[in-house]
Image (tube, helix red, strand yellow):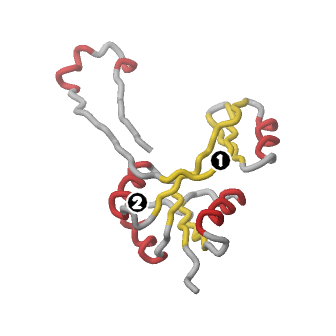
Amino acid sequence: MGYPKVVLWVSRHKPMREEVDELKKLYGEDVVIVTVNRRFKAVDELLKIVSETNPVAMVCILPLSFVMHLIEYLGDRVVILMPEMVTITVTRNKRQAMELVKKGARVMVKRLDKYEVKEFRGYKRVKRIVIETEPVGIHENINNINNVNDIHISHTEVV
């Protein structure tokens, strides 16, 4: 008989029951979920925890640059998972949003003056993240900018 598999849950939020149930389906009923609820200054801090816990998978709610470095360093040794959260409504009515959250695997996110209700639909494996950049060239283009709205920052993220 082997040891139970470990999944490292890295988020400021505790996993919902439905998220844990899905991890049990994926990795077995005896899966051990180790939660890490803290901020990291560098990826190396998190990699130390990975080496101590030896997880088969990680659920990461982290900046994409952190996740990108994890994938580069860990390769296929650890599966990086991302919860698939689908927006089911956006409302200004907090009470309505709270009522919808009670009806399933849902969370409420405040966005300025609105409340977004999202529903958990499973996990997706993150295989690659690409951050595409280009030189700013501000010195040669400074005379062509009429206002701040003319400045555009573009990047591509493949998840």
SS at circle 1: strand
Left or right: 109 with respect to 150? right
- The residue that label 2 is drawn on is 41
Q: In the image, what residue occupies the spot 40% across and 67% down?
A: 77
Left or right: 40 with respect to 106? left
Q: In the image, what residue occupies the spot 53% across and 62% down?
A: 38
Q: In the figure, 71 relative to 134: above or below? A: below
Left or right: 141 with respect to 57? left
Foreground pick, 86 / 63: 86
The image shows residue 8 at horizontal and vertical percentages of 53, 67
Foreground pick, 128 / 61: 128
Q: Residues within 10 Å of mark 2 (few under 14, many from 20)?
A: few
Which amino acid is tagged 2?
Answer: Lys
Q: Which label lies toward us, 1 or 2?
A: 1
Precedes in sequence: disc 1 or disc 2: 2
- The residue that label 1 is drawn on is 121
The image shows residue 94 at horizontal and vertical percentages of 77, 36
Q: Quadrant of residue 117?
A: top right
